[in-house]
Amino acid sequence: MQSDVVFRTAKGWDTFSDKYARRIQKNTSVFCMTLLNMVHYEDADSILDAGCGAGYLHQHMMNQKKPDAHLYGFDLSSQMVKRAGARMKKSLNKDKIGSLDILTQEEVDSVNFDDEIFKKLNYHLSVGNVEDLSQYQNEMFNIYVCNLVYQIIGDQQKAISEAFRVLKPGGKFGITVWGRRENCAALWFLKELALETGLSPVGMQGGRFVSNPEELIALATNAGFINAVCWLQMAPFDVVSMKNIEEFFNPEIEGILANSTQEQRDTYYKALEKMLNDYKRENKPFPFECYLLVAEKPQ
């Protein structure tokens, strides 16, 4: 759903950060959890979560990492990273036990990346870009993970070269990217239905779907990584009914609907309902497939 060209910009992600944090990142974090298991981050001294979004798994990572290990996270969107910080602060407040995703804008805006609370936790947040990691030194991290970012950036080879640079010898590299388009309906159905129903002149634009694992393996190998392992994984998206469908609308879809007639909106919603019902009749979840890759930097 965060698939169009607008989501290559910080502004696009800032606008979408609340919905993404509350409704979408919990779905996509399934892939990141698999990466973390595969790279054995619990043994690392320094971990980088590149393009961390709202830091959905950071509390889990903090609980599982070594006590003195450092966890770094950055994202293109300042609002996303501030949500990661707000979630972490809320998790430490025992008087406010409950959903970490329900945050006020005041809680988000009040986050200071240099907060002493974060320093005591060895938790480091910043705004950044996976294609330019100049804020980090050479051979700084044992682990680099990047979940669902590489398919929407401009220069994948530059990003992976930067990952290689900041990893220590023997360090582990893990990324996830979109899989085969036909198995990623969760990404394109909103915009494609807007095209089919006449609300939009174009369907989904931007981003790359991967159909062959050799493409990812070559990307890692060309950067200098060894022992690459690549596999497919599918996660069901929790789009289950028309009752919660608007929670998944990104700013572009909201804008298209706002500029449409009532008749056009009714047609769009009917098409959405039909698509959801078709999946139900086939007893299938709403699919989201990804390729995952783990590799090592030579000693």
Image (spheres, grey):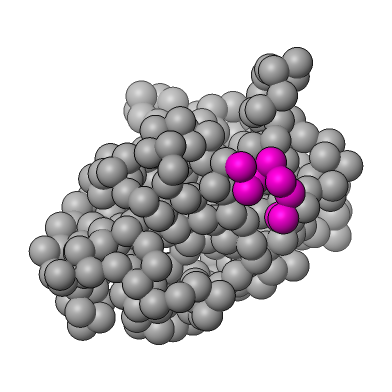
- Whether residue 290 is in magenta: the answer is no
The answer to whether residue 118 is left or right of residue 133 is right
> Would you say residue 153 is visible in this rendering?
no
Q: Is residue 118 visible?
A: yes
Q: Within the image, what quadrant is residue 140 found in?
A: bottom left
The span picked out in magenta is: 113-120
* Rendered residue at 29%/68% (across/down): 168
Q: Is residue 31 above or below residue 179?
A: above
Report the number of discs.
0
Coordinates of residue 185 in the picture (x, y in percent): 44, 49
Q: Which of 231 and 141 is in front in this view?
A: 141
Measuring from the top left, give residue 107's x and y in whole percent.
82, 40
Q: Residue furthest right?
A: 106
Image height of 244 relative to 41, above or below: above
Looking at the rendered image, the quarter that the C terminus falls into is bottom left
Say if the magenta span includes residue 118: yes
Residue at (23, 69) in percent of width and height = 169
Residue drawn at x 38%, y 39% is 66
Of residues 166 and 100, the one drawn nearer to the viewer in this rendering: 166
Question: Residue 141 location, x and y as percent?
Answer: 37, 62
Q: Is the magenta stretch mostly helix, strand or loop?
A: helix
| Image x and y of residue 33, in percent | 37, 40
Query: In the current view of this chain or complex, which residue is farthest to the left?
Result: 227
Q: Nearer the viewer, residue 203 or 68?
A: 68
Residue pictured at 48% horizontal, 61% vertical: 50
